[in-house]
Amino acid sequence: MPVLIPENLAELREAACSHDPVLLAGGTDLMVALNHRSQRIESDLTVVSLAQVPELRSWSHDPTSGELTIGSGITWSQLERAPFDALAPALAQAARTVGSPQIRNAGTIGGNIATASPAGDGLPVLLALDATVDSVGSDGERSTPLSELLTGTKRTSLAPGEVIVAVRFKVDDGWQGYAKIGVRNAMVISVAGVALVLDGTARRARIALGSVGPTVLLAGEASAFLTSEFDWDAWTCSEATIATVAEMAAEESRPIDDHRSTAEYRRHGVRVLTSRLLKRGRERR
Amino acid sequence: MTTTSTSERREVTAIAGGVGEPVLRPDGGAKVDGSFEFSSDRSVDGELWAVTVRSPHPRARILNVDVSAAVALPGVAAVITADDVPGVNGFGLIASDQPVFAVDEVRFVGEPVAAVAATDAETCARAAELVVVTYEVLEPLLDAERAIDGTFEPIHPDGNLIRHQRIVRGDSDFVGEVIVEGTYEIGMQDQAFLGLEAAVAVPDADGAGVELLVATQWLHEDRRQIATCLGVDEERVKLTLGGVGGAFGGREDISLQVHVSLLALVTGRPVRAAYSRSESFIGHVHRHPAAIWMRHHADRDGTLRKVEARFVLDGGAYASTSSAVLINAVTHAQGPYRCENAVVDGYAVRTNHLPCGAMRGFGVVQACFAHERQMDRLAAACDMDPVDLRLLNAMETGDHLITGQRVENVAPVARCIRETMALPLPEPETEDHVLSLPGGAGLTADGSVVRGVGMAVSIKNLMYSEGFDDYSTARCVVRDGRVALKFATAEVGQGFVTIAMQIARTELGLADVDFESIDTAVGSAGSTSASRQTWMSGGAVVEACRGVVGQILDQVATDRELDRDGLRIEGEWVTADGVPVVMVAEAVAGHLFEFTAEYHHPETTELDEYGQGDCHTAFAFTAHRAVVDVDPDLGLLRVVQIATAQDVGRALNPLSVVGQIEGGVAQGLGLAVMEEIIQTNGVIRNASFTDYLIPTIADMPPVVISLVEEPDPRAPLGAKGVGEPPCISVTPAIVAAVDDALRKAGRRVSPLTRVPIRPQDIALAGEGSTATVGS
Ligand SMILES: Cc1cc2nc3c(=O)[nH]c(=O)nc-3n(C[C@H](O)[C@H](O)[C@H](O)COP(=O)(O)OP(=O)(O)OC[C@H]3O[C@@H](n4cnc5c(N)ncnc54)[C@H](O)[C@@H]3O)c2cc1C
């Protein structure tokens, strides 16, 4: 099976469009799938490595618009640290919960999006941030809201060979946070995860949930209720609001029983995490 | 003969690197830097790879096996099934009830049906997918109770009940002033050794026998079973131990040994196989999941008077060591406490779950979880401190088990409890790091974390039981001043080779000790299990060395015309009536000495129908204290510290003992809070380290240790086995600490009764639970 290693975006487009490619970023999802034989690379497929494309490994922040653009090849290890820990603390927190240091050194945010697992730790944060995904494919470039890109469990609207170039979203000096329940204290797949973004500029709250549905979910009603009940000037909300929002988020989750946990506990976890995040957000902790 | 003139200068000091020192192990550095050769790393010229084709069903009739497409795939050298097994198509440690390849019926998900040899692993995998097995799916037996009550048809010719054992002692009608009762559940734990199953089989020159390099726990028992299946004399099967990366009981049964040996004979070429992690989960036996009911009777002052219990161990599809695990469980039902009355029933049953067998603790882990949870209940019912209750009832040498057996060993139970409780509690955490909170990296914890403390105690038998003579053999050769030891003791990472070298140095007074290849060219050493090798193979090495010492002293007596009776080896010297006469190294120069010894432990007996008999060889005792931080709303926790005092007899290598204790604690902690194989409808759901969770460095607390050294007169060199005891009472100690924390949080009055504890068991249950919105 041939392996192509393009060295810039133009070469990558060329390579990805003219073949039936398997895109390889950090390989931390792809190699597991291959080893478990849940995915096969037949010999007529071409592996296209994304590792040497500088455009995918860059990022930018526009202080005027507040937009942060993160190349798809940025790793979790990078996202844990400066400048991302200050610009997008919820994403940095999500990054800290991913796997082990070895996995974080290799795994990328683009791979997390393309894998589209409901347990992908970057996804609730990106969904709560209302992120947009920029991609290139044989039909050219497009920008898609993450909520539209994710179509089902481990399914996206990405066409074969379509490459995620970057993901972008607005950040401000409001508050954002992420918390994840796992059955051990590190290197664990999420049993339930909650991301909360309090956007002080747009005066809008967004709550997104991981591992409690077929895809990551936006808790739309809880978000809308919080948006209207939060006192944006005083930057506070009542205990009653917190309890209601937590209850609404729990109601909006669609968890199942599986070998990792039960639906009942997951729903409970969403309630507790939403409540705790909102208390942290209210105090800007 | 003048020795006195120089004797003032001759100082008899202990030899460096001898018994009692923290000698470093020879394999340690290589394991850390990655250069150690595990059996999966071994490659042989001209080798083929092998892979096993396994059942996807927990129970199904095999209607047809069509290997034609697989055989036709280029690169495939052979595909074998039950039809190709030349000897007995059955193996097993106690009963040969498990087929090499299934015939007629498959009985668990993962049961081997065929095996493929091909030029490379990928071709093997593709060929395996081309083996077409036609099944008629049958209703699986998954409920252990139905295996006991006889309402399910036999799923195996040997029946659904593997063994029932009853123990009745004293007054079975006795009713205590205080009675506590509970039902307990222990999940299926995996050994999770890091070095996966692997072997290389090389056919003999004449193609009638095979040489096998394999990671195993008991070379000679493997050889017996392989030879039986191959239909050849045992001499035609030679085994050498490959590099073993942990075992914990999971390598005691045959896994891929017969498959690769047979493929080597069929193809006439070396054949190599190595399991993946997911295959390993279905390719070896596990710790028995158990349901245990117990009722304890006591006087109002807390004196334990009677234990009633019913054990149900799910043995899965094949017998393995289930009957021995059951005996361990029922005979340890009272724990390390005096108790004169007992009525205990135990059942080991066959189901269509994954087969279970040996795992570190061997039945006692399950029993201890139940009896220690009961002791906590009893303490509450008697309004006593749990530590005082245990001290009041602590067993001593001379006390009896409920089997009527007298405990002859050193039994410092009270001392273990006192020393454990006297160890320092953890210092308050100074830095505010997320990994020091329950939930760790997930950043879930807020201010509501509560700390609890709990403790538990265990008794564990050492060596094999019920009349089995699990002897060990060792040979000692002294040539050119160097010692060469030969034994078949499987070094699985426990450090026996280090201990053996230390023993030889101390016994012989010679510094240079080598050990030869560990293989079947010498007599059996028995299994590296049951905490037995330091005692049994250590005993054999002691006796082999002492045989050589006798020869050396004979030589010195003759050479120097000394009275043989006054001669001894002390330090590096031969002494006459305590006076150094010649260094051992000088005395042995130019001579060859050799001695082979077999070490046997005292005989044991079988149990009678009332479970009475001296069935065990020896006992060791341990206490654990756990400190655990709990987030009651989410049910997440972090073990903060484990303290333990362990009855080790004598620490031949204190560093090794600490290693065993820390590792055992990690394994017992895993069982307490996360490790469980989940099967639904007989299908394993978490056959990977993604979902079968074992503790990481972020879950493993510091372990503070006190070694209780009271040399046991019955043990060679006074040393008791230390392998299993550390992993037993740590589990109930952690659970007791969680209960304590929940009580402090005002959450729960009824104790936790199941391991592993799942977050929902804490967050969603319990009287007085306010499991709604977190603080
Ligand atoms: C031990 C272990 C622990 C893990 N723990 C976690 C965890 O805690 N949380 C979590 O969220 N994940 C976890 N993962 C999963 C994985 O590490 C992440 O999803 C990671 O972000 C994947 O990125 P990658 O670069 O390795 O992707 P790859 O494996 O290289 O690719 C994954 C998929 O995405 C496609 N792809 C990759 N990049 C692009 C692109 N730019 N455009 C289009 N398609 C692309 C690939 O073709 C492939 O189908 C873990 C994995 C392992 C092995």
Image (cartoon, coloured by chain):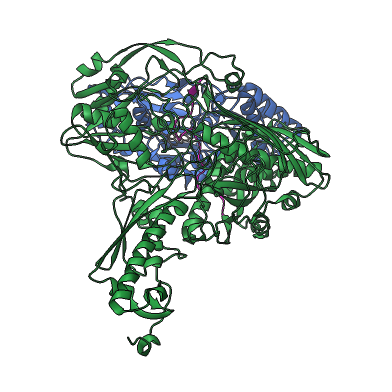
Quarter of the image containing the N terminus of chain B? bottom left
Image coordinates of residue B226 in percent, x first then y, are 32, 33
Image coordinates of residue A97 in percent, x first then y, are 51, 40
> Please, what is the dominant secondary structure of the magenta stretch?
loop
Count of numbered tags: 0
Output the letter for the chain in green. B
* Residue closest to the eye, B127 or B570: B570
Residue B159 within the magenta-colored segment of the rendering: no
Quarter of the image containing the C terminus of chain B? top right
Image coordinates of residue A102 in percent, x first then y, are 40, 43
Q: Where B330 sits versus B556, above or below? A: above
The segment highlighted magenta reads B682-702
Q: Where B53 sits versus B358, above or below? A: above
Image coordinates of residue A44 in percent, x first then y, are 22, 21
Residue B693 within the magenta-colored segment of the rendering: yes
Q: Is residue B673 left or right of residue B267?
A: right
Output the letter for the chain in blue. A
Can residue A48 be seen? Answer: no
* Residue closest to the eye, B707 or A284: B707
Can residue B164 be seen? Answer: yes
Q: Where B272 sits versus B535, above or below? A: above
